Image: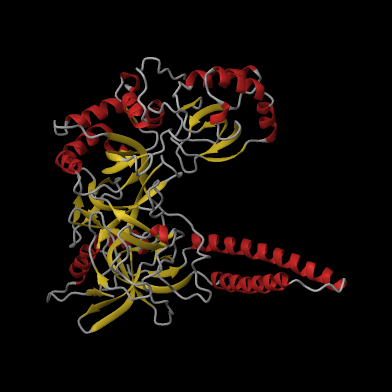
Amino acid sequence: MAQNWAWLPTPPDSPRKRRQQLRESEEVSGMMQIEDYIYRTDSYRSTSMQHPPPLPYRTEPADRRTTEEVEALGTDIFAILETHGFPRARMTGMPVVQRLLKPGYPSYNPTTVLRIVYRDIRLPRPMGPAKDELLDLLRRSGIANVEVEILDIEKTFRPSLFAISATAPEVREYESSKAKMIEVLENTLRGAWKTMCMYQFGQNKRKSSPTVVITVDPRARCNWHKLMLELREVQPMVSHLPVEFLPGGLGDLAGNSQFDSMQDYGIAQVGESITVAGEQGGGTLGLFAHLTYGETTYWGFLTNFHVVRPAKSAEADVINRANRHGSSLHIDDGTRCQVVRFAPKDITETVLDGQQRAEELKAELRGLHQRKYYLELKNTPIPRDINTSTTEYEKLLARYERRLGVAATMPTGIGRVLLSSGATMWNNRVGDWAFVQMFENITYQPFTFPTIPSPQKPSRGLNYQEGMPLAGFGEMKANEWYFKVGKSTGLTSGVCNGVQVSCRWNAGDSVRHDMSGNQLIVEPKVTEEFVILSEVGDHVQTDFCKPGDSGSVLINRWGRVCGLLYGSTYTYAGIDLNVYAGLAMTMPDVKETIKLKSRNNDGQHAVLEL
């Protein structure tokens, strides 16, 4: 469908203002998929694809025959672009024929596209007519399986989310109207919306502004223009907060190689992959700790309940009991599952990764040995760099083979669940923790404050020395800096948003219980959670975490353990395919619910300690 912006007055200089003008026009009114709404409000992208998902895509070369057919039309392609006022000087390279992929995006099939990418077009022009003429050229030339896309990579819609200050005046306005906005979303979208929160929102941090961001299911249908107006109506009359809709959701499990992070001799460590026997996916070993109950002290580690709850293959009554009550410190009721390292999905990825690296090293060594052989035949002295490289590669290969040997013995038992939260709710937030008692024969690497890479360091500096034991427990606070070590993304840092995120859980995840095991029906199925966003420099949003990092602990710049990561929220629109932020419990909630879950009739309870 051709885009026509002829009705617009002189375009504003800012892409944000230009997009706002499009979003407030009747041109985007009516029922449509979220993908079409985002596309229609982006005047710096024009494509012939039907219901195009938001940028970005993963790209790969198109097949050779199709590429040659399109490239043969190069002169005509450039002539059309010049006719419509798109200068070759502003192109980021030549027009290219690519297959566009969006892994994990519902109902999207890889599409072959002629892509023409510009950078910072000074005088914005309608791209639709040029795109339509190029598509007509392809079809008249008998090329029926190639679409056309023209975009300005600097100005097209690729937003980032950043933490907003808790003291921003817009936050007060948002908090005062949040309940009414949730009511509007429930009445209109029901279960199709996933999260709502206020962030700094924009193409980069410098250009970001306070915005209410609502994530919805991909392919969700709605009159988004009308919904935006309804959300504005329930806000204070002083000013209307900007509202953005993005396709997104809440994270699940995935497999990751542990080859770089694992110890050569299989020593257990914070941040590695764990799961329960019988499951394929898993989460993260979060923190080595003590659990003290009266005169007895248990040694083990902290992670999430959902990481170590009974496997899906367990008996239904065991699963229900675990969800309802968790595992008890006083009674072994069949819910104390054995925990193993690594998760089978991660073992597979680790072995494949290690084998590939080992084969690459062996090939390099064969080449070095061959060079030495021919030099020796000629009685030529062996250069020092060849001997040095050979020695280093042989050491590295031996290290790789030790790690592969360890991975071949996995999964191995590391401990057994001793106490867990079950699927609980506390203070209108998710409760999701477990303490795993480690087996006595397990060797572990004590965790100390690590070296924080420069890009990850807080702007106000660190207040703790690397290599020191952790200082104790703290609490999650708005706009504070934290780091975590997870099995999927390793060490990353971020900032706790100044506003808690409203999470709309699906039917299964919304079934929660109080500390006594009584079922709580959350209506609407919404909780308020701490959310942590990446904070690396002054550029664009990156991942704070990915699926599988659940169970990591959050540590502040004073060396205190302040939170427990249990999940993630992500968007499909931005700089990367999916950009993840973290969801976390605050440690006071973890410690208090440990007391409540472990209390006996005499009032005695367990205490979590480092």
Residue 591 sits above or below residue 230 on the image = below
Left or right: where 222 falls relative to 408: left
Above/below status of 482 relative to 201: below
Coloring basis for residues = secondary structure
> Residue shown at 14%/41% (left/top)?
176
Q: Is residue 282 visible?
A: no
Q: Position of residue 98 (x, y in %)?
A: 59, 35
Place of residue 343 in the rendered image (x, y in percent of width and height, measured from the top left): 46, 63
Residue at far top of view: 7
Residue 471 position (above or below residue 255): below
Quadrant housing residue 592? bottom left
Question: Which quadrant would the C terminus be assigned to in this image?
Answer: bottom left
- Most distant residue in the left direction: 602
Q: Residue at x 67, y 74 (%)?
A: 391
At 56% from the left and 21% from the top, the residue drawn is: 81
Q: Is residue 208 left or right of residue 362?
A: left
- Residue furthest bottom as drawn: 295
Q: Name the side, left or right, on which 239 lies relative to 42.
A: left
Decide which of 322, 282 is in the foreground and name it. Answer: 282
Residue, x 69% and y 25% (percent of image)? Answer: 72
Q: Is residue 61 visible?
A: yes
Q: Position of residue 338 (x, y in %)?
A: 39, 70
Position of 433 with respect to 592 (left or right) is right
Residue 278, image x and y in percent?
44, 63
Residue 475, quarter of the rendered image: bottom left
Q: How many marks?
A: 0
Toward the viewer: 397 or 75? 75
| Observer-nearest of 583 and 165 | 165
